[in-house]
Amino acid sequence: MNWSEVCIHTTHEAMEPVTNILQELHYGGVVIEDPLDITKERDSIFGEIYELNHDKYPSEGIFIKVYLLMDEQLDPNIAKIKDSIDRLASYGIDLGENKLTFREVKAEDWETSWKKYYKPVSVSPHITVVPSWEEYIPEAENEVMIKLDPGMAFGTGTHPTTMLSIQALEKTLNPNDTVIDVGCGSGVLSIAAGLLGARKINAYDLDEVAISSTRDNVNMNDLTEQVTAQQNNLLDDVNKQADVIVANILAEVIIKFTKDAWNNLKHGGYFITSGIIKAKQELVEQALEEVGFQMIEINEMDDWICMIAKKV
C-alpha cells in the first residue's frame, strides 16, 4: 500500500506544537527537516549531519513531514491536520508559510530509510543514546548507554530539549530517587532516570502509542522493574510523592499542571521542565513561581530552554 507524504512548511517556533498535534491525532512519527541542522557546528565524531542534501531543505523555516495511508480517509485526515494547525495562530504561535504539500511515496521507500540518519548521539559526557539497530562500543568506563527505538512515538533523544532534560536529570537525581516522567513519548527520559540510579519511575503519556513504545524501550534497557508506563492526561488524578518530576512538553501544557507537579513532589524535590521556546520562558517561569517553586537553574540550547525548579 502506498502513502501520502504530507509536508508542512512552518517555523521553528511552531515545530513542537505542530509535532504534538500530529501525535495527538495518532498519525505516528514525523520527519523534521531543519536547515539549521546543516549549517550548525556540533561536537560529533559521526559526521552524518554534513551529508544531508541542502536542496531538500527550505530557505526559511522548517519542513515537518508525516505519512498517511492513501485510502478513503486521506482527504478528511489532511483537512483535520490543516484545521488543527491553523488554530495554533489563536495562541500567538507564528506559523510562517503554513503551507501543506503532498506527494505519493511507496512504503518501502520510507519505512526504514530514516534510520540511516539516526546514529549514536553523545547527550552528555557520560550518556550516549544509541539506536537499537546500531552497534556501539562505549568509549568510557562509566559511560551510560541508552538503547532506543522510537518507533511511532516522539523522542529520539537527539533534540535539544531532550538533551537538556537528560543533563538536568544528571544534576538533580540521586540514587534510589523516585521519578515521574510526564509526556514520556518514547520513554527516553524514564530510561535515562533508571540508568542513572532512580529506584522507581512512573511514566505517563496520553498517547497509547507512546506508552507502547516506552514499554518496549524500557524492556530493551532491562528496566522493567523500575519503570511503569501508564496512559494518563498529564498528572490528572495522580497522587504520588516523587523526588524528581520531568516534563519535556510544550510551554502551554506545562503551565496547566504546575500545581499538580507541586502536589506530587516531596519538599526539596525538583521539577525539570523543557520543550520551552525562548519566547515562552517568562510565561513558564511566572507559572512556576506563582505555585511556589524556586528557580534553581535555567539552561539554553539552540533557543530552547530547560528549567530546574525546586519545591521549597
Image (spheres, rainbow, N blue to C red):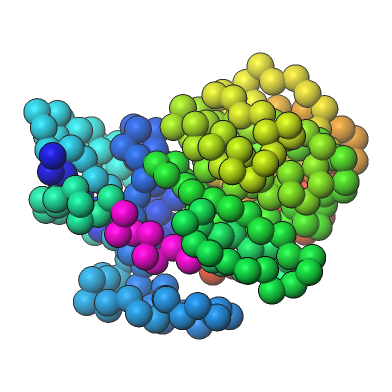
Find out whether residue 148 is within the magenta segment: no
The one nearer the camera, 95 or 241, is 241
Residue 35, horizontal then vertical, whole percent: 35, 73
Q: Is residue 310 above or below residue 43?
A: above
Q: Quadrant of the N terminus?
A: top left
Residue 208, horizontal then vertical, whole percent: 46, 27
Which secondary structure class fits the magenta region best? helix
Is 193 positioned to the left or the right of 66 in the image? right
Q: Is residue 236 above or below residue 178?
A: above
Q: Using the rendered view, name the quadrant where residue 12 is placed.
A: bottom left
Find out whether residue 115 is within the magenta segment: yes
Residue 221, horizontal then vertical, whole percent: 64, 45
User: What residue is rendered at 54% in x and 24% in y?
Assistant: 231
Is there any visible trace of residue 158 in the rendered image? Answer: no
Q: Using the rendered view, name the quadrant where residue 57 is placed.
A: bottom left
User: What residue is rendered at 39% in x and 33% in y?
Assistant: 24
Q: Is residue 228 above or below residue 104?
A: above
Q: Quadrant of the C terminus?
A: top right
The furthest residue to the top: 237
Q: Is residue 125 above or below residue 15?
A: below
User: What residue is rendered at 77% in x and 57% in y?
Assistant: 170
Range covered by the magenta-colored residues: 112-119
User: What residue is rendered at 16% in x and 44% in y?
Assistant: 3
The one nearer the camera, 234 or 108, is 108
Is 255 positioned to the left or the right of 16 in the image? right
How many numbered marks appear? 0
Is there any visible trace of residue 192 in the rendered image? Answer: yes
